[in-house]
Image: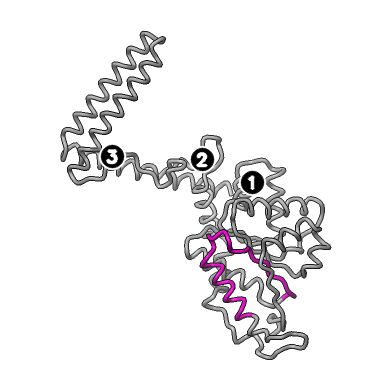
Amino acid sequence: MNDLIQQVNRQFEKKRLRNDAIAKNRKEEIYKSIPKIKAIDVEMAQIMQEIIKTVTESPQNAKHGAQQAAKIGKSLNAQKRRLLSENGFAEDYLERIFDCPICQDEGYLEDGTRCSCFRKALNDLAYRHSDLRAKLKKENFDTFKLELFSDQVLPDEEISQRENMTNIVETSMAFIENIKMPHVENLLFYGSPGQGKTFMCSCIAKALIDADYHVVYQTAYKMFDTIKDYKFANDLAARTRYQLLIDCDLLIVDDLGTELINTFTHTELFHIINARLLEQKKTLISTNLNPQELREHYGERIISRLIGHYRIIRFFGDDLRFS
Protein backbone atom coordinates (compact mmCIF):
# COMPACT_ATOMS: atom_id res chain seq x y z
CA MET A 1 0.00 0.00 0.00
CA ASN A 2 2.84 2.43 0.80
CA ASP A 3 4.23 1.89 -2.71
CA LEU A 4 0.79 2.65 -4.17
CA ILE A 5 0.56 5.82 -2.07
CA GLN A 6 3.92 6.96 -3.45
CA GLN A 7 2.69 6.29 -6.99
CA VAL A 8 -0.44 8.36 -6.39
CA ASN A 9 1.68 11.15 -4.87
CA ARG A 10 3.68 11.21 -8.10
CA GLN A 11 0.46 11.33 -10.12
CA PHE A 12 -0.67 14.37 -8.13
CA GLU A 13 2.70 16.07 -8.58
CA LYS A 14 2.45 15.59 -12.35
CA LYS A 15 -1.09 16.93 -12.24
CA ARG A 16 0.03 20.10 -10.44
CA LEU A 17 2.93 20.63 -12.85
CA ARG A 18 0.62 20.14 -15.84
CA ASN A 19 -1.95 22.63 -14.57
CA ASP A 20 0.75 25.14 -13.62
CA ALA A 21 2.14 24.91 -17.17
CA ILE A 22 -1.34 25.49 -18.63
CA ALA A 23 -1.82 28.53 -16.38
CA LYS A 24 1.59 29.90 -17.37
CA ASN A 25 0.81 29.51 -21.08
CA ARG A 26 -2.52 31.23 -20.62
CA LYS A 27 -0.90 34.17 -18.89
CA GLU A 28 1.64 34.55 -21.70
CA GLU A 29 -1.20 34.35 -24.24
CA ILE A 30 -3.21 37.05 -22.47
CA TYR A 31 -0.23 39.34 -21.98
CA LYS A 32 0.29 39.29 -25.76
CA SER A 33 -3.40 39.64 -26.61
CA ILE A 34 -4.35 42.16 -23.92
CA PRO A 35 -1.27 44.19 -22.83
CA LYS A 36 -3.44 46.20 -20.43
CA ILE A 37 -3.78 43.12 -18.21
CA LYS A 38 0.00 42.79 -17.95
CA ALA A 39 0.15 46.45 -16.95
CA ILE A 40 -2.48 45.83 -14.26
CA ASP A 41 -0.47 42.89 -12.88
CA VAL A 42 2.69 45.02 -12.77
CA GLU A 43 0.79 47.82 -11.04
CA MET A 44 -0.71 45.38 -8.54
CA ALA A 45 2.71 43.91 -7.71
CA GLN A 46 4.20 47.37 -7.14
CA ILE A 47 1.33 48.44 -4.88
CA MET A 48 1.60 45.24 -2.84
CA GLN A 49 5.33 45.75 -2.38
CA GLU A 50 4.71 49.27 -1.09
CA ILE A 51 2.04 48.04 1.33
CA ILE A 52 4.32 45.26 2.62
CA LYS A 53 7.13 47.76 3.13
CA THR A 54 4.83 50.12 5.05
CA VAL A 55 3.52 47.32 7.27
CA THR A 56 7.05 46.04 7.93
CA GLU A 57 8.18 49.49 9.02
CA SER A 58 5.01 50.15 11.03
CA PRO A 59 3.52 46.85 12.31
CA GLN A 60 0.73 48.76 14.05
CA ASN A 61 -0.63 49.50 10.58
CA ALA A 62 -0.88 45.82 9.62
CA LYS A 63 -4.68 45.67 9.80
CA HIS A 64 -5.09 48.83 7.73
CA GLY A 65 -2.55 47.54 5.21
CA ALA A 66 -4.38 44.24 4.80
CA GLN A 67 -7.68 46.04 4.26
CA GLN A 68 -6.09 48.37 1.73
CA ALA A 69 -4.49 45.46 -0.14
CA ALA A 70 -7.81 43.60 -0.31
CA LYS A 71 -9.63 46.69 -1.61
CA ILE A 72 -7.04 47.42 -4.30
CA GLY A 73 -6.78 43.77 -5.30
CA LYS A 74 -10.55 43.48 -5.67
CA SER A 75 -10.71 46.57 -7.88
CA LEU A 76 -7.82 45.55 -10.15
CA ASN A 77 -9.09 41.97 -10.46
CA ALA A 78 -12.49 43.31 -11.50
CA GLN A 79 -10.77 45.31 -14.24
CA LYS A 80 -8.94 42.21 -15.45
CA ARG A 81 -12.10 40.12 -15.55
CA ARG A 82 -13.89 42.84 -17.51
CA LEU A 83 -11.04 43.06 -20.03
CA LEU A 84 -11.01 39.28 -20.46
CA SER A 85 -14.75 39.21 -21.09
CA GLU A 86 -14.59 42.11 -23.56
CA ASN A 87 -11.92 40.25 -25.53
CA GLY A 88 -13.81 36.97 -25.76
CA PHE A 89 -12.18 35.08 -22.89
CA ALA A 90 -13.83 33.55 -19.83
CA GLU A 91 -13.59 35.86 -16.82
CA ASP A 92 -11.76 33.15 -14.83
CA TYR A 93 -9.33 32.35 -17.68
CA LEU A 94 -6.33 33.46 -15.60
CA GLU A 95 -7.41 31.77 -12.38
CA ARG A 96 -5.33 28.87 -11.07
CA ILE A 97 -6.38 25.52 -12.53
CA PHE A 98 -7.23 22.54 -10.33
CA ASP A 99 -8.63 19.12 -11.12
CA CYS A 100 -9.96 19.08 -7.55
CA PRO A 101 -11.00 22.48 -6.14
CA ILE A 102 -11.44 20.97 -2.67
CA CYS A 103 -7.76 20.15 -2.03
CA GLN A 104 -6.35 22.15 -4.98
CA ASP A 105 -4.63 18.97 -6.21
CA GLU A 106 -2.54 18.62 -3.06
CA GLY A 107 -4.28 15.36 -2.15
CA TYR A 108 -4.86 16.34 1.47
CA LEU A 109 -6.98 18.81 3.40
CA GLU A 110 -6.08 21.47 5.95
CA ASP A 111 -6.64 19.04 8.84
CA GLY A 112 -4.08 16.65 7.35
CA THR A 113 -6.55 14.02 6.15
CA ARG A 114 -6.48 12.71 2.61
CA CYS A 115 -8.92 14.28 0.18
CA SER A 116 -11.58 12.02 -1.35
CA CYS A 117 -9.97 12.54 -4.79
CA PHE A 118 -6.71 11.06 -3.49
CA ARG A 119 -8.47 8.10 -1.92
CA LYS A 120 -10.34 7.42 -5.17
CA ALA A 121 -7.10 7.61 -7.18
CA LEU A 122 -5.51 5.19 -4.71
CA ASN A 123 -8.43 2.78 -4.96
CA ASP A 124 -8.39 2.94 -8.77
CA LEU A 125 -4.67 2.18 -8.82
CA ALA A 126 -5.09 -0.67 -6.35
CA TYR A 127 -7.86 -2.10 -8.54
CA ARG A 128 -5.64 -2.04 -11.63
CA HIS A 129 -2.99 -4.01 -9.72
CA SER A 130 -5.36 -6.40 -7.94
CA ASP A 131 -6.86 -9.82 -8.60
CA LEU A 132 -10.28 -8.13 -8.64
CA ARG A 133 -9.70 -6.79 -12.14
CA ALA A 134 -9.19 -10.31 -13.51
CA LYS A 135 -12.18 -11.55 -11.53
CA LEU A 136 -14.51 -8.87 -12.90
CA LYS A 137 -13.30 -9.54 -16.42
CA LYS A 138 -14.79 -13.03 -16.05
CA GLU A 139 -17.78 -12.16 -13.88
CA ASN A 140 -19.95 -9.40 -15.34
CA PHE A 141 -23.28 -8.87 -17.05
CA ASP A 142 -21.76 -9.71 -20.44
CA THR A 143 -20.74 -13.18 -19.24
CA PHE A 144 -23.87 -13.77 -17.16
CA LYS A 145 -25.91 -16.68 -18.56
CA LEU A 146 -29.52 -16.83 -17.43
CA GLU A 147 -29.98 -20.22 -19.11
CA LEU A 148 -27.75 -21.82 -16.46
CA PHE A 149 -30.58 -21.42 -13.98
CA SER A 150 -33.39 -23.97 -13.95
CA ASP A 151 -36.75 -22.92 -15.34
CA GLN A 152 -38.51 -25.58 -13.23
CA VAL A 153 -40.51 -24.39 -10.25
CA LEU A 154 -39.06 -26.07 -7.17
CA PRO A 155 -41.18 -27.53 -4.37
CA ASP A 156 -42.08 -24.87 -1.79
CA GLU A 157 -41.27 -22.09 -4.27
CA GLU A 158 -43.72 -20.03 -6.31
CA ILE A 159 -41.33 -19.25 -9.17
CA SER A 160 -38.38 -20.96 -10.85
CA GLN A 161 -34.75 -20.21 -10.09
CA ARG A 162 -34.46 -18.64 -13.55
CA GLU A 163 -37.39 -16.30 -12.96
CA ASN A 164 -35.98 -15.38 -9.57
CA MET A 165 -32.64 -14.53 -11.17
CA THR A 166 -34.41 -12.49 -13.85
CA ASN A 167 -35.99 -10.42 -11.08
CA ILE A 168 -32.64 -10.08 -9.30
CA VAL A 169 -30.93 -8.85 -12.48
CA GLU A 170 -33.68 -6.25 -12.97
CA THR A 171 -33.34 -5.12 -9.36
CA SER A 172 -29.55 -4.94 -9.71
CA MET A 173 -29.75 -2.89 -12.91
CA ALA A 174 -32.16 -0.44 -11.27
CA PHE A 175 -29.78 -0.21 -8.31
CA ILE A 176 -26.87 0.62 -10.64
CA GLU A 177 -28.83 3.23 -12.59
CA ASN A 178 -30.01 4.98 -9.42
CA ILE A 179 -26.94 4.51 -7.22
CA LYS A 180 -26.84 8.21 -6.28
CA MET A 181 -30.54 8.52 -5.43
CA PRO A 182 -31.15 8.80 -1.65
CA HIS A 183 -34.38 6.80 -1.80
CA VAL A 184 -32.71 3.72 -3.32
CA GLU A 185 -32.24 0.99 -0.73
CA ASN A 186 -29.00 -0.85 -0.08
CA LEU A 187 -28.93 -4.52 -1.06
CA LEU A 188 -28.56 -7.69 1.01
CA PHE A 189 -28.16 -10.92 -0.97
CA TYR A 190 -28.65 -14.15 0.98
CA GLY A 191 -28.92 -17.82 0.11
CA SER A 192 -26.97 -21.06 0.09
CA PRO A 193 -23.51 -21.24 -1.53
CA GLY A 194 -23.33 -21.58 -5.30
CA GLN A 195 -26.53 -19.75 -6.20
CA GLY A 196 -24.97 -16.71 -7.88
CA LYS A 197 -24.65 -14.14 -5.07
CA THR A 198 -20.94 -13.45 -5.53
CA PHE A 199 -21.28 -13.45 -9.32
CA MET A 200 -24.05 -10.85 -9.13
CA CYS A 201 -21.91 -8.75 -6.76
CA SER A 202 -19.18 -8.84 -9.39
CA CYS A 203 -21.63 -7.81 -12.13
CA ILE A 204 -22.72 -4.79 -10.13
CA ALA A 205 -19.14 -3.86 -9.23
CA LYS A 206 -17.95 -4.05 -12.85
CA ALA A 207 -20.85 -1.96 -14.17
CA LEU A 208 -20.26 0.80 -11.63
CA ILE A 209 -16.47 0.81 -11.97
CA ASP A 210 -16.87 1.10 -15.75
CA ALA A 211 -19.18 4.08 -15.11
CA ASP A 212 -16.38 5.70 -13.06
CA TYR A 213 -17.92 5.10 -9.65
CA HIS A 214 -15.72 4.44 -6.65
CA VAL A 215 -16.28 0.81 -5.62
CA VAL A 216 -14.60 -1.14 -2.82
CA TYR A 217 -15.15 -4.91 -3.01
CA GLN A 218 -13.94 -6.97 -0.05
CA THR A 219 -14.80 -10.23 1.64
CA ALA A 220 -16.03 -9.78 5.20
CA TYR A 221 -12.81 -11.40 6.43
CA LYS A 222 -10.67 -8.91 4.50
CA MET A 223 -12.80 -5.95 5.58
CA PHE A 224 -12.35 -6.76 9.26
CA ASP A 225 -8.60 -7.17 8.69
CA THR A 226 -8.60 -3.67 7.16
CA ILE A 227 -10.42 -2.34 10.23
CA LYS A 228 -8.00 -4.08 12.62
CA ASP A 229 -5.03 -2.56 10.80
CA TYR A 230 -6.61 0.88 11.14
CA LYS A 231 -7.32 0.40 14.84
CA PHE A 232 -3.94 -1.01 15.81
CA ALA A 233 -1.34 -0.22 13.09
CA ASN A 234 -1.92 3.55 13.20
CA ASP A 235 -0.15 4.44 9.95
CA LEU A 236 -1.17 6.43 6.90
CA ALA A 237 -1.70 3.41 4.67
CA ALA A 238 -4.02 1.75 7.20
CA ARG A 239 -5.99 4.96 7.74
CA THR A 240 -6.37 5.42 3.99
CA ARG A 241 -7.60 1.85 3.45
CA TYR A 242 -10.09 2.25 6.28
CA GLN A 243 -11.40 5.58 5.02
CA LEU A 244 -12.09 3.98 1.64
CA LEU A 245 -14.64 1.74 3.39
CA ILE A 246 -16.57 4.83 4.50
CA ASP A 247 -16.14 7.10 1.47
CA CYS A 248 -16.60 4.87 -1.57
CA ASP A 249 -19.75 5.15 -3.68
CA LEU A 250 -20.43 1.45 -3.17
CA LEU A 251 -19.01 -0.89 -0.55
CA ILE A 252 -19.48 -4.58 -1.37
CA VAL A 253 -19.04 -6.96 1.57
CA ASP A 254 -18.99 -10.54 0.30
CA ASP A 255 -19.49 -13.65 2.46
CA LEU A 256 -20.60 -11.92 5.64
CA GLY A 257 -20.65 -14.52 8.39
CA THR A 258 -17.48 -16.36 7.33
CA GLU A 259 -15.30 -14.12 9.53
CA LEU A 260 -14.57 -14.83 13.19
CA ILE A 261 -17.62 -13.36 14.88
CA ASN A 262 -17.00 -11.62 18.20
CA THR A 263 -17.62 -8.35 20.02
CA PHE A 264 -15.07 -6.54 17.83
CA THR A 265 -16.72 -7.59 14.56
CA HIS A 266 -20.18 -6.79 15.95
CA THR A 267 -19.12 -3.28 16.92
CA GLU A 268 -17.22 -2.52 13.73
CA LEU A 269 -19.87 -3.94 11.41
CA PHE A 270 -22.49 -1.74 13.05
CA HIS A 271 -20.19 1.27 12.74
CA ILE A 272 -19.52 0.68 9.03
CA ILE A 273 -23.21 0.12 8.24
CA ASN A 274 -24.30 3.13 10.29
CA ALA A 275 -21.56 5.47 9.02
CA ARG A 276 -22.43 4.71 5.42
CA LEU A 277 -26.13 5.23 6.08
CA LEU A 278 -25.35 8.64 7.58
CA GLU A 279 -23.19 9.52 4.56
CA GLN A 280 -25.94 8.24 2.22
CA LYS A 281 -23.45 5.86 0.60
CA LYS A 282 -24.71 2.58 -0.82
CA THR A 283 -23.68 -0.84 0.52
CA LEU A 284 -24.16 -4.34 -0.90
CA ILE A 285 -23.80 -7.32 1.44
CA SER A 286 -23.87 -10.99 0.47
CA THR A 287 -24.17 -13.81 2.99
CA ASN A 288 -25.04 -17.48 3.32
CA LEU A 289 -27.01 -16.64 6.47
CA ASN A 290 -30.74 -16.07 6.37
CA PRO A 291 -32.27 -13.12 8.28
CA GLN A 292 -32.94 -15.21 11.40
CA GLU A 293 -29.35 -16.50 11.42
CA LEU A 294 -28.08 -12.94 10.94
CA ARG A 295 -30.10 -11.89 13.99
CA GLU A 296 -28.63 -14.76 16.02
CA HIS A 297 -25.05 -13.99 14.92
CA TYR A 298 -25.06 -10.18 15.00
CA GLY A 299 -27.90 -9.14 17.28
CA GLU A 300 -30.97 -6.98 17.06
CA ARG A 301 -29.15 -3.67 16.61
CA ILE A 302 -27.51 -4.72 13.32
CA ILE A 303 -30.46 -6.68 11.94
CA SER A 304 -32.73 -3.68 12.54
CA ARG A 305 -30.43 -1.55 10.36
CA LEU A 306 -30.46 -4.21 7.64
CA ILE A 307 -34.22 -4.69 7.67
CA GLY A 308 -34.87 -0.96 7.82
CA HIS A 309 -32.44 0.22 5.14
CA TYR A 310 -31.67 -2.76 2.89
CA ARG A 311 -33.66 -4.55 0.24
CA ILE A 312 -33.32 -8.19 1.26
CA ILE A 313 -33.10 -10.54 -1.73
CA ARG A 314 -33.14 -14.32 -1.49
CA PHE A 315 -31.24 -16.57 -3.89
CA PHE A 316 -32.45 -20.16 -4.14
CA GLY A 317 -32.21 -23.23 -6.33
CA ASP A 318 -29.49 -25.58 -7.52
CA ASP A 319 -25.84 -25.15 -6.58
CA LEU A 320 -24.32 -23.96 -9.87
CA ARG A 321 -20.82 -24.94 -8.79
CA PHE A 322 -21.70 -28.57 -9.50
CA SER A 323 -23.78 -28.04 -12.63
Query: Which of the labelled discs sits on residue 276, or is there none?
Result: none
Residue identified by numbered label 3: 94
| Image spot of residue 267 (x, y percent) | 76, 50
Against 122, residue 201 (above or below) is below
Q: How many neighbours does mark 2 have within 10 angstroms: few (below 14), some (14-19), or many (20 or more)?
A: some
Sequence-wise, the earlier of marks 1 and 2 is: 2
- As helix, strand or loop, the secondary structure at mark 1 comes to helix
Query: Which of the labelled discs sits on residue 108, or is there none?
Result: 2
- As helix, strand or loop, the secondary structure at mark 2 comes to loop
Is 315 on the left or on the right of 74, as rendered? Answer: right
Marks 1 and 2, how far apart in space?
16 Å
Residue toward you, 287 or 171: 171
Kind of residue sitting beneath label 3: Leu
Badges 1 and 2: C-beta atoms under 8 Å apart? no
The magenta segment: 165-193
Instruction: Name the colouring of the figure.
Output: one colour
| Image spot of residue 104 (x, y percent) | 43, 41
Q: Nearer the viewer, mark 3 or mark 2?
A: 3
Sequence-wise, the earlier of marks 3 and 1 is: 3
| Image spot of residue 103 (x, y percent) | 46, 41
Is 5 on the left or on the right of 278, as rendered? Answer: left
- As helix, strand or loop, the secondary structure at mark 3 comes to loop
Place residue 165 in its image quadrant.
bottom right
Q: Is residue 200 magenta?
A: no
Query: Which of the labelled discs sits on residue 238, or is there none?
Result: 1
Marks 3 and 1, how far apart in space?
39 Å
Badges 3 and 1: C-beta atoms under 8 Å apart? no
Marks 3 and 2, how far apart in space?
24 Å
Residue toward you, 102 or 186: 186
